[in-house]
Image (cartoon, rainbow, N blue to C red):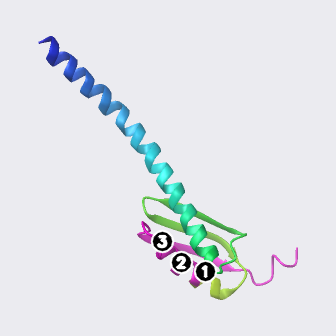
Amino acid sequence: MKTALVSTLALLISSAIAPGAHAQASQATDQELAHSVRVAEARSGVGMSHVFVFAHSGQVTLVGWVPEREHVARAEQSAMSVPGVTSVDNRLSPDGGSLNGH
């Protein structure tokens, strides 16, 4: 009886701790994925100085401005080429010179 109680208690404690550990691991993975996307885009020649990359469970969102219209499509293609990316929500806009004037 005592062994069953200790085993049950240990199981309850471990299941209470595990979700927190999983959330931290998932958050780290999301940050790593966002970083990998930024690196891939920079390597493909996309101007990244005004781009934010958000990742959550393989879904990537790109927000901001790029210096040239062609960079919008290139950014999406680069993001999709990163292992672990399942979808890309591309909300990038071409700069159109507005940032160069400031």
Image coordinates of residue 43 in percent, x first then y, are 62, 76
Residue 62 visible in the picture: no
Residue topped by disc 3: 82
Sort mark 3 into few (<14), some (14-19) or many (20+) by Cα contacts within 10 Å: some
Sort mark 1 into few (<14), some (14-19) or many (20+) by Cα contacts within 10 Å: some
Residue topped by disc 1: 44
Name the residue located 41 percent from the left edge and 69 percent from the top edge.
86
Q: Is residue 61 left or right of residue 12?
A: right
Instruction: Looking at the picture, tell me which residue is in the foreground, 35 or 94.
Output: 35
Q: Quadrant of the N terminus?
A: top left
Q: Mark 2 and mark 3 in contact? Answer it, CB < 8 Å.
A: yes
Q: Could you give the CA–CA distance between mark 2 and mark 3, rounded to whole angstroms?
A: 7 Å
Name the residue located 20 percent from the left edge and 22 percent from the top edge.
7
Image coordinates of residue 4 in percent, x first then y, are 14, 18
Res. 4 mark: none
Q: Is residue 2 left or right of residue 31?
A: left
Q: In which quarter of the image is the C terminus?
A: bottom right
Residue span colored magenta: 74-102
Q: Earlier in the sequence, mark 3 or mark 1?
A: 1
Q: Quadrant of residue 92?
A: bottom right
Residue 20 visible in the picture: yes
As helix, strand or loop, the secondary structure at mark 1 comes to: loop
Res. 78 mark: 2
In the displayed structure, 26 sits above or below 15; it is below
Name the residue located 55 percent from the left edge and 68 percent from the top edge.
37
Q: Mark 1 and mark 2 in contact? Answer it, CB < 8 Å.
A: yes
- Magenta residue check for 86: yes
Q: What residue type is labelled 1?
A: Ser
Q: Could you give the CA–CA distance between mark 3 and mark 1, rounded to whole angstroms?
A: 12 Å
As helix, strand or loop, the secondary structure at mark 2 comes to: helix
Q: Quadrant of residue 40?
A: bottom right
